[in-house]
Image (cartoon, rainbow, N blue to C red):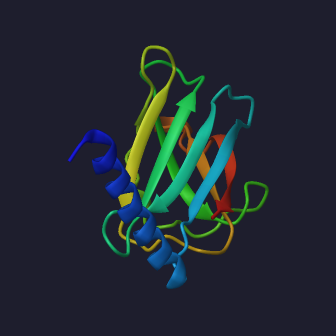
Amino acid sequence: MNYWRRHAAAGLALLAGASAAAAMGARHIEWFGVLKPVNGASIAGNAGMVAGERDGSTEVSLVLSGATSGAVYAWVVLRGHCDGSGGRTLGTDAQYKAATANATGGAEVTVTLPVALPDSGTFHVRVRASGQRAATVLACGNLYLED
């Protein structure tokens, strides 16, 4: 089978699978948000949530810029909005691996939570200082549902 036939066959199979999923009412759900600095910090970034590879799991990714080289930052997804008092953590605090800034002030981290991806509600991501200033929120971003 030549190159174009092979890729055309793969494309048709993919379309057939997508059509079957659409017919069954399956939705592609993704949450995305932009983090903005708060409390005089310079950290910004973005975060997103998608369904994990295993049923009942959620993959959450965080990308930061403007961080202090070598600094470690705690972060978490919470119910509610940034301008509220927070809410319950999606998963547990211990399931969020800290983000460590590289030499240029960037950081990237992805975790898989053992909870199903929410298909409704309100969520936000908070990034906090570590150590003695752990209660200080440095960046926050509301997550918005995209499907």
Residue at 68%, 43% (x, y): give it: 34
To which quarter of the image does residue 79 belong? bottom right
Q: How many marks?
A: 0
Q: Quadrant of the C terminus?
A: bottom right
Q: Position of residue 46 (x, y in %)?
A: 60, 41
Q: In this orientation, which residue lies closer to the viewer: 122 or 128?
A: 122
Q: Position of residue 127 (x, y in %)?
A: 57, 43
For residue 61, say whether it is visible. yes
- Please say if 24 is above or below 83: below
Q: Residue furthest bottom?
A: 24
Residue at 62%, 52% (x, y): give it: 32
Q: In this orientation, which residue lies closer to the viewer: 117 or 98?
A: 117
Residue at 61%, 49% (x, y): give it: 126
Q: Residue furthest right?
A: 83
Q: Is residue 29 left or right of residue 7?
A: right
Q: Residue furthest left?
A: 1
- Please say if 146 is above or below 7: below
Q: Is residue 129 left or right of residue 17?
A: right
Residue at 52%, 36% (x, y): give it: 63
For residue 52, say whether it is visible. no
Q: Position of residue 29 (x, y in %)?
A: 56, 66
